[in-house]
Image: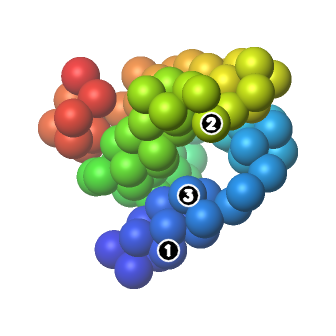
Amino acid sequence: SKRLKHTNASLFKEANNVALMATIAESVSILWDSIKNELSKSQNETCNELLKEIFSGNVLTEVYDHFASKFENEEDFEDSKLGDCFRACVAILHCAGKLDEPNIEGLR
């Protein structure tokens, strides 16, 4: 599981299509919202725990920091890419809000 988290964060940061990565982050957030009622049912506790485990730890922090760092180097980015970085940051924070505080390092 730790290997999976590290791989996910690394791949996300290496992708160079910022708009597509922002859309993926938004999709995860929206899909997570769409199944939150199902995840809260006792028979789906294992699925809920697995989802939380995959996104817990430093994976969200690393990906968030990657996109947030783009604002510091904004002269290297066109406005549309900065907008995409902002979309990604918002979606990542939205996902982080679904996790307990001890499960996300550096985002609360």
The x and y percentages for residue 82 are 67, 24
Q: Residue at x 27, y 39 (%)?
A: 104
Marks 3 and 2 sit apart, C-alpha to C-alpha, by 17 Å
Q: Tell me which label, 1 or 3, sits earlier in the chain.
A: 1
In the picture, the disc for residue 76 is 2
* Residue 35 visible (yes or no): no
Marks 2 and 1 sit apart, C-alpha to C-alpha, by 26 Å
Give, as a three-letter code, the residue at label 1. Answer: Thr
In the picture, the disc for residue 13 is 3
Q: Are marks 3 and 2 in contact (CB under 8 Å)?
A: no
* Left or right: 64, with 31 as reference point: left
Q: Residue at x 60, y 65 (%)?
A: 14
Q: Nearer the viewer, mark 1 or mark 3?
A: 3
Mark 3 closeness class: few <14, some 14–19, many ≥20 residues within 10 Å: some
Q: Residue at x 74, y 43 (%)?
A: 18
Q: Residue at x 55, y 58 (%)?
A: 13
Instruction: Looking at the picture, tell me which residue is in the foreground, 20 or 5.
Output: 20
Instruction: Looking at the picture, tell me which residue is in the foreground, 77 or 45.
Output: 77
The x and y percentages for residue 76 are 62, 36
Q: Nearer the viewer, mark 2 or mark 1?
A: 2
Instruction: Looking at the picture, tell me which residue is in the foreground, 82 or 37.
Output: 82
Q: Tell me which label, 2 or 1, sits earlier in the chain.
A: 1
Which residue in the structure is indicated by mark 1? 7
- Judged from the image, the secondary structure of the residue bearing numbered disc 1 is helix
Give, as a three-letter code, the residue at label 3. Answer: Lys
Above or below, 106 relative to 47: above
Marks 1 and 3 sit apart, C-alpha to C-alpha, by 10 Å
Instruction: Looking at the picture, tell me which residue is in the foreground, 41 or 85.
Output: 85
- Judged from the image, the secondary structure of the residue bearing numbered disc 2 is helix
